[in-house]
Amino acid sequence: MPIVVNLDVELAKRKMTVNQLAAAIGITPANVSVLKSGRAKAVRFSTLEAICRVLGCQPGDLLVYAPDEVHDS
């Protein structure tokens, strides 16, 4: 998938656990794990905003576009 989720990197930088983040943003640890693993099909802007607020980061720190294949124009 061309969207890479770096939530685990941001959590590690802050020495924060999935459970701590889940409690801070008001969602279940299972849902944070789904986001962290990149298995989520979607993320609400309100959830993304809460994660960025708690971690003190930007959405671009969490989500990166990395195409599987480069096409020449």
Image (tube, grey):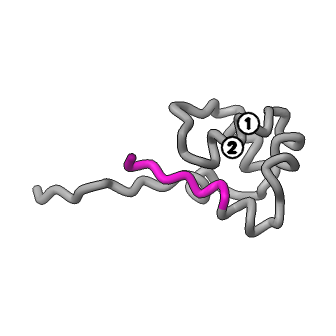
54 left or right, relative to 1: right
Residue where numbered disc 1 is placed = 30
Q: Residue furthest bottom?
A: 13
Residue 6 inside the magenta-drawn segment:
yes
Q: Residue at 48%, 55% (x, y): give it.
A: 64
Q: Does the CB distance between marks 2 and 1 fall below 8 Å? A: yes
**How many neighbours does mark 1 have within 10 angstroms: few (below 14), some (14-19), or many (20 or more)?**
few
Residue 1 place in picture, x, y as percent: 39, 46
- SS for callout 2: helix
1 left or right, relative to 21: left
* Front-most of residues 37 and 14: 37
Q: Residue at 56%, 36% (x, y): give it.
A: 40
Q: Is residue 56 above or below residue 19?
A: below
Q: Residue at 80%, 66% (x, y): give it.
A: 14
**How many neighbours does mark 2 have within 10 angstroms: few (below 14), some (14-19), or many (20 or more)?**
some
Q: Amino acid at mark 1?
A: Ala
Residue 61 place in picture, x, y as percent: 60, 59
Residue 53 place in picture, x, y as percent: 78, 49
Quadrant (top left, top right, bottom left, bottom right) of the C terminus? bottom left
Q: Residue at 82%, 50% (x, y): give it.
A: 54
Residue where numbered disc 2 is placed = 33
User: How far apart in space, not on screen, are marks 2 and 1 (Cα)?
Assistant: 5 Å
* Front-most of residues 38 and 67: 38
Q: Is residue 67 above or below residue 45?
A: below
The part of the chain drawn in magenta is 1-8
Using the rendered view, name the quadrant where residue 7 is placed: bottom right
